[in-house]
Amino acid sequence: MKTLSMVFRNTVGRLVRVNVDNVRDDITEAEIKNAMEALVSKNVFEISGGELKEPVSASIITTQTQEFDLVL
């Protein structure tokens, strides 16, 4: 599974992380930047400590799961 992790600075200077699970494999840096800017400009999240004010960073986190058959 791939998760997009976006970090923003809010109005009081704190860093706020927003994660989106199951991000597309072909998402581009430009799409991520545009999405982050849209989240800031449209103020879609109510966050304690103030509104999102600026994008800081973004990363894609890939998680791999390995299951084991433990039939006894």
Image (cartoon, helix red, strand yellow):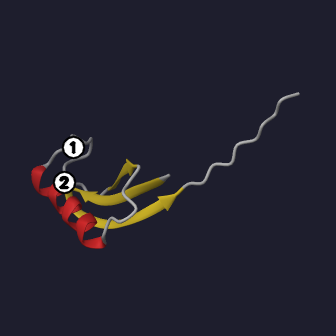
Where residue 20 is drawn, which disc sits there? Answer: none
Residue 67 sits above or below residue 17 on the image: above
Marks 2 and 1: in contact by CB < 8 Å? Answer: yes
Q: Estimate the x, y position of residue 5 in percent, counting from the top left.
A: 39, 57
> Would you identify the image quadrant in which residue 30 lies?
bottom left
- Describe residue 46's horizontal placement relative to residue 17 as left or right: left
Provide residue 48's location: percent of width, then percent of height.
Answer: 27, 41
Q: Count residues near mark 1 (Cα–Cα under 10 Å), then give few for <14, some for 14-19, many for 20+.
A: few
Residue type marked 2: Leu
* 1 or 2: tag closer to the N-terminus: 2
> Residue at coordinates 17% horizontally, 45% vertically from top-left?
44
Q: Which residue lies at the image location 15% right of the left edge and 57% below the top edge?
A: 38
User: Which residue is located at x 11 percent, y 51 percent?
Assistant: 42
* Front in this rendered view, residue 2 or 57: 2
Q: Give the CA separation, mark 1 to mark 2.
A: 8 Å
Q: Residue furthest left?
A: 42
Mark 1 = which residue?
Answer: 45
Query: Label 2 belongs to which residue?
Result: 39
Q: Quadrant of residue 37?
A: bottom left
User: Which kind of residue does numbered mark 1 sit on?
Assistant: Phe
Q: Under tag 1, what secondary structure?
A: loop
Q: Quadrant of the C terminus?
A: top right
- Looking at the picture, how far across and down is residue 12, in whole percent? 24, 54
Q: Nearer the viewer, residue 15 or 41?
A: 41
On the picture, is 53 further left or further right than 58? left
Q: Secondary structure at mark 2?
A: helix
